[in-house]
Image: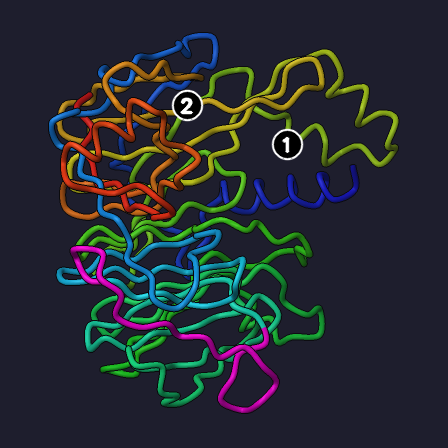
Amino acid sequence: MEKIFIAFSFILLISTGCTHNNSQPREYVTVPVNYHDAITAIDTQIVDIGSVQYIPLKCQNGVVGEISQMIVCKDFYVLLDKQQKCVWLFDCNGGFINLISRQGKGPEEYRSIDRIALTPDEQVYVMGYDNPGILIYDLKGKYLKTKFLRYCPLDFAYTDSVLYSLYYYIPENSDNKEKFYLHINNEKTNEQRDLLRYHKSLHEGFYDNLFSLCKEEVFLNMPLNDTIYQIASGKDLKRAYFFDFGTERYPNKALMKLENEDEKEALLRGRAFQGKISKFRISKNYLTFQYAYTQNNINKISNMIYNRATGKFINYNGLVWQGLYSDLSYPLAADDNYFYTILFPYQISKRGVKYLESKGIEVSDNVYIVKFKYKV
């Protein structure tokens, strides 16, 4: 429970949205979210079935393992394999390009690999939660250099020569002038900016993508928060979307006033709370995320798909598969119009096998990238 308490203290900080001048634009979209409204949806309600593409990955150096992050480029895909601690590169047809596997203790090797980023000039940035150094490789796996951050990052992103890094733990003895969660470094102009003032050390890591990129737009989903921020022009933070969880949101302020563990458990027991956004993805037309809610001390998950243009959304807690031929996992990435996920052979039904074979795709042991559009 103590870890939960520490995490909740983070909410109060982020809700203030502190910057250097404590000013933020008030123009943002409010979306109501109520888990009572979550339905069991049919896949054809949310996915444009005609848009679905199955891209088999043709591996030459082993088998693709657990994929935790995907970067979609014009001509290729970059996949972070947390299970095998490596980075896969495949072309747009699923053809194998290269495997970056440099785990080790040497100066040109990474000890751990938790997040990756790709620069416009196709350099691969590799980050580990336990290391303030970002190792940089080219697409062939050649080591280029190491870039050191101020502290160990929780997440990072790169776009248009700007490196965004988010810290989750800053030592107490650090200079107060440097105590900010979000650091922005424009490598072209060498301009630096710090946002979201750090109030109290947070030792809990939230292992999810917190930055989401959509073309030149950069969005930030802070842990356990109900707001999606946009980093405008690569330097200014503003609220973009506020998800209103109503009166049943987690009682953050009340929990922070309690020191006794029994009192905390009594506050949470037997009541329903919601509001922990995770797995936020955004495209030109849609945003989607999962949110957690607690009911009778049982944690549950529901999903939201929101149409950015029309304001329509669907809130669902389960899917019935009728139009698709396999279990469509939660999207790992998005680009202009499409969302992307990974599909393993065991997730494909017999009907799906026949369908793919009719398209000239042999299932066997292939892992697939599935590309699709929402239609809410």
* Residue appearing at x 41%, y 8% in the figure: 37
Q: Point out the image quarter for the N terminus.
A: top right
Rendered view: 134 above or below 240: below
Q: Nearer the viewer, residue 13 or 345?
A: 345
Whole-percent x, y for residue 111 in the image: 59, 76
Task: Kindly identify the amino acid type of the residue bearing the numbered disc 1.
Answer: Asn
Tell me where the magenta segment starts and ends, as one range.
91-111
Label pair 1/2, CB-CB below 8 angstroms = no
- Using the rendered view, name the quadrant where residue 106 is placed: bottom right
Q: Nearer the viewer, residue 114 or 196?
A: 114
Which element is circle 2 on?
Answer: strand
Rendered view: 198 above or below 251: below
* Image-based side of 234 in relation to 39, left or right: left
Whole-percent x, y for residue 190 in the image: 30, 83
Task: Kindly identify the amino acid type of the residue bearing the numbered disc 2.
Answer: Asp
Which element is circle 1 on?
Answer: helix
* Image-based side of 157 in relation to 73, left or right: right
